[in-house]
Image (spheres, rainbow, N blue to C red):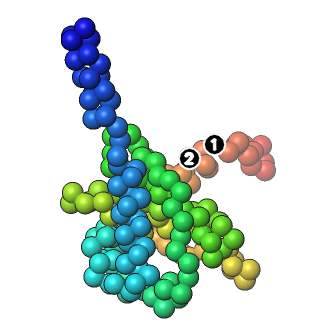
């Protein structure tokens, strides 16, 4: 009976140790970043961003962000099992509840928001109405000359006038 109780307790302990608390920590990191952003706390925001994303801080529209409702965090999932990269799912009440995702990663032992990766996930390529393709001249490379030669060799031979 005692051995069985100890076995059950060990299994419960192992199960609790194996729980993945990463998504919860990622959500907390995003919420902390969002609060600092809305409170216009630039230094706190800097600490909650990846090194690469910190460069974007100067370009953020602080006044406009402070006037908006905060995003609603609805969950987070671990990306690429084994890595410390998470997608935090949010709803934007300022945009009719539109869904979006933010990337949160572990950098230097801390959970931080990666605005650059987040923007890359939601970026859409839009072609301007007045845009057109433009070819720019460049020097031909040896590989270009080789492709031209292969093309010429692949064409059927034409007979010259006069019987040859």
Which quadrant would the C terminus be assigned to in this image? Answer: top right
Image position, residue 86 (x, y; %): 41, 52
Image position, residue 122 (x, y; %): 56, 64
Query: Mark 2 sits on what residue?
Result: 150
- Compared to residue 145, the image places residue 31 above or below, namely below
Image position, residue 81 (x, y; %): 38, 40
Query: In the shown orientation, is residue 143 left or right of residue 14?
Result: right
On the question of residue 63 being in view, the answer is yes
Mark 2 crowd level (few <14, some 14–19, many ≥20, 10 Å Cα):
few
Which residue occupies the foreground of this view, 4 or 68?
4
Mark 1 crowd level (few <14, some 14–19, many ≥20, 10 Å Cα):
few
Q: Check the image and name the residue furthest to the front.
A: 1
Which quadrant would the N terminus be assigned to in this image? Answer: top left
Q: Residue at x 33, y 70 (%)?
A: 49
Q: Residue at x 48, y 91 (%)?
A: 63
Q: Quadrant of residue 103?
A: bottom left
Query: In the shown orientation, is residue 129 left or right of residue 114?
Result: right
Q: Check the image and name the residue furthest to the bottom.
A: 63
Image position, residue 77 (x, y; %): 46, 48
Q: Are marks 2 and 1 in contact (CB under 8 Å)?
A: yes
Q: In the structure shown, which secondary structural element does the residue marked by tag 1 occupy?
A: helix
Report the Cα–Cα distance between label 2 and label 1: 6 Å
Which residue occupies the foreground of this view, 81 or 141?
81
- Compared to residue 76, the image places residue 64 above or below, namely below
Query: In the shown orientation, is residue 163 left or right of residue 57?
Result: right
Q: Residue at x 51, y 61 (%)?
A: 73
Query: Mark 1 sits on what residue?
Result: 154
């Amino acid at each position: 009976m005692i051995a069985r109780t100890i076995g059950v307790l060990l299994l419960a302990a192992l199960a609790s140790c194996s729980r993945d608390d990463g998504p919860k920590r990622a959500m907390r990191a995003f919420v902390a970043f969002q609060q600092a952003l809305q409170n216009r706390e630039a230094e706190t925001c800097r600490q909650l961003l990846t090194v690469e994303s910190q460069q974007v801080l100067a370009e953020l529209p602080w006044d406009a962000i402070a006037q908006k409702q905060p995003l609603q965090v609805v969950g987070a999932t671990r990306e690429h099992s084994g890595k410390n990269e998470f997608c935090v799912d949010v709803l934007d009440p300022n945009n009719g509840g539109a869904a979006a995702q933010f990337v949160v990663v572990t950098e230097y032992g801390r959970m931080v928001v990666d605005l650059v990766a987040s923007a890359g996930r939601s970026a859409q390529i839009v072609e301007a109405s007045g845009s057109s393709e433009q070819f720019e001249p460049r020097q031909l490379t040896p590989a270009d000359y080789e492709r031209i030669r292969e093309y010429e060799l692949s064409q059927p031979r034409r007979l010259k006038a006069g019987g040859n």
